[in-house]
Amino acid sequence: DDNARLSQIAYEAGAIDFSRDRFDDGTRPFFFPGADPKGNAVADQLTLEQQENLTESGQMNELSFGVGTAIAPNIMLGGGLNIAFGSYTFERFYRETDVGNGQTNQVCSSPGLCPPADPADPERPYDPYLATDLDGNILLEGFDEMQLERRVDTDLAGVNFRIGLSAEPTEALRVGTHVSSPTWLNVDEVFGTEIRTFFDCDFSTGSCVRPEEPFSSGNLTGNEFSYDIRTPWRLGGGFQYSLGSVTLAGGATFIDWTQAEVSAEDGGSSNPNCSAQGLDPIEELNCDIQGLDPTVNTRAGLEYETEAFALRTGVAYQPSPTDQSFQDTDGTTADGDRLSLSAGVSVSLGPNSTLHLNWLQERFDDRFVSYSSDRGTSPTVREALQRNRVLVGFTYRP
């Protein structure tokens, strides 16, 4: 349970503390945060400054092997095997800092609220937070700052194949259809979370001394998990029309996303009863997949070709199978539809060989919910993503 693990790390790091009174009364939640701007003691003088940085990086590589042959006049049959491999890294840094400044009798060097000068007779506003051990002994006082880091390192490898058939009804027109198999991917992840909490005061010496080291708990590389992904089958068709040195091409691909599947050796069923209770995360994910919509991806391209070289450009559109839009913190509405732009050049190296260089950029919006909130809408970060791919190819015709 990721929430339970995160709660344990937060408690061990001093970001939250246990309330014996709430536990004895049976009032949930039994834990309370280190800083609460709505608390009575702070008298509306506690301001939390939030900062979050999200970084996603990675690469996807593919080795392709293909063959083709003429099975009848003006009819070609071909196929290919693709081996995919790559990596992905997700990093999150989140910080909450007490920057409130409404206290007249500061007992600490923090610019925010400090613990009371007289704990026996505290005068509002003051920082009431105490970090205690399980026996209730006070360890540190006054919340200053909390830092949360999360990291996911992923390695993946997979394979798929493709079969296509093309024909030339006329000299200028070529039409074709293809079937792409699922990509069978194996994914290995190393991930973890670390939380650090800084306090205003350590009174163990008799006066307020700001601790140099924070309380910390967790490990950014402490967990490993492996699972398999099977993507859907794809059925597509297209055309190519040539007029002199100019060629226009277009096509569409149908995808039934409900055919996708996620499985793990220590996970739940890949075909669960989605109406049942107590589903594990893998089963919940497969239930979400069963609710996806089918999509039709479209594409179009233009090429200018001479004996020495060829120039081409293209555009593709992929609608999101979730059919759900969202709003970020600025109120901007976005969805998960993807737009791809491409450009390329081919250069003849001789009568039988050609060098190809292609660039592809994929653009889409994604979202990240920083945390769930019971006091209004959860802050949602809009991620405007761009992925660039450069492909180099070589063709030899004996």
Image (cartoon, rainbow, N blue to C red):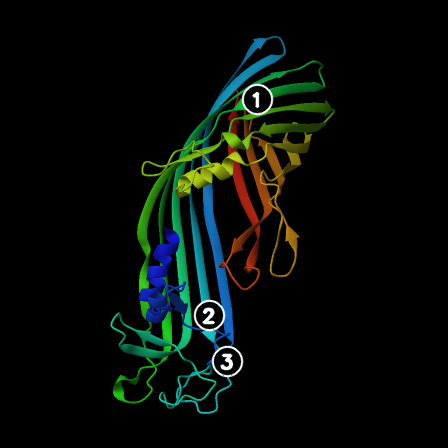
Looking at the image, is mark 3 or mark 1 nearer the viewer?
Answer: 3
Query: Toward the viewer: 63 or 163?
Result: 163
Residue 332 pos. (x, y %): 66, 56
Element at label 1: strand
**Relative to 296, 121 lies left or right:** left
Q: Amino acid at mark 3?
A: Gly
Looking at the image, is mark 2 or mark 1 nearer the viewer?
Answer: 2
Q: Residue at x 50, y 36 (%)?
A: 289
Query: Against 261, is 335 above or below?
Result: below
Q: Which numbered marker is on residue 178?
A: 1
Q: Which numbered marker is on residue 96?
A: 2
Q: Residue at x 37, y 65 (%)?
A: 30
Residue reaching furthest to the top: 72
Q: Amino acid at mark 1?
A: His
Q: Say if residue 85 shows up in the picture.
A: yes
Q: Are marks 2 and 1 in contact (CB under 8 Å)?
A: no
The local crowd at label 3, few if under 14, some if 14 to 19, many if 20 or more residues have their Cα within 10 Å, is many
Element at label 2: strand
Q: Say if residue 352 shows up in the picture.
A: no
Q: Which numbered marker is on residue 64?
A: none
Residue under label 3:
100
